Amino acid sequence: MTTPRLSTLPGPTFRAGIQVATGVHRNDTYTVAQVLTYHVPPTPGQSEREISDGMQAIAASLRLGAHDEAPPFIGHGRIQLAGITPHLNYGRDDSRIALPVGEDWRTVAQSGAAVRVIVLFDPLWPGGGQNALAAHVDACYDRGTLRWGTTFL
């Protein structure tokens, strides 16, 4: 995995640009609750490299694994169900990432199913729809600019 150049984890200002998509993936052998995080493109004074480094630092803090290997177990407590909205805890209490989940996601995760966390390093504007997001995930996979791992509630 590429080592991020940040010595500290990104805080609230960086966190403000992080977008989250959640969903449930089902196939014949398993069901998994998914959490996908990515960052919007750079704002004035910010570079794509800074975004990539920040997302890499988050992935490293979560102990996410390489995209082309089986997703590693990243430990318990990564998803916190404090109150109504679950949060992804990447190691900064002032910058936990709120997860917009539906009842189906919550039911699957609370049943003991795996929760797959995916972090993309390349920025993307939100609002392009599921097809644009899926194409971006595929492109990040092809470039090796995503990390993933598995946790449980």
Image (cartoon, helix red, strand yellow):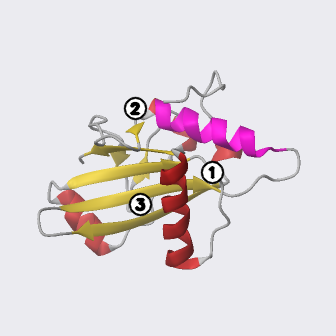
Q: Secondary structure at mark 3?
A: loop
How packed mark 3 is, by other alpha carbons closer than 10 Å (few <14, some 14-19, many 20 or more), is: few
- Residue 22 is tagged as none
Which of the two discs, 1 and 2, labels the residue nearer the N terminus? 2
Question: Bounds of the magenta span?
Answer: 46-60
Closer to the N terminus: mark 1 or mark 3? 3
Q: Is any part of residue 95 visible from this angle?
A: yes
Q: Nearer the viewer, residue 85 or 48?
A: 48
Which one is nearer the viewer's eye here, 109 or 144? 144
Q: Position of residue 93 (x, y in %)?
A: 51, 36
Q: Secondary structure at mark 2?
A: loop
Badge 1 is on which residue? Answer: 122
Across and down, in percent, residue 94 comes to: 57, 39
According to the picture, the residue beneath numbered tag 2 turns out to be 63
Query: What amino acid does circle 2 point to?
Result: Arg
Check if residue 125 falls in the magenta segment. Answer: no
For residue 107, what is the image quadrant?
Answer: bottom left
CA separation, marks 2 and 3?
Answer: 23 Å
Quick one: label 2 or label 3, which is nearer the N terminus? 2
Residue drawn at 41 percent across, 38 percent down: 66
Foreground pick, 98 / 72: 72
Relative placement, left or right, of 47 versus 121 is right
Relative image position of residue 85 (x, y in whole percent):
41, 60
Instruction: Please report contact status of discs 1 and 3: CB closer than 8 Å, yes or no.
Output: no
Question: How many residues crowd around disc 1 within 10 Å: few (fewer than 14), some, or many (20 or more)?
Answer: many
Q: Is residue 84 left or right of residue 98?
A: left
Q: Amino acid at mark 1?
A: Asp
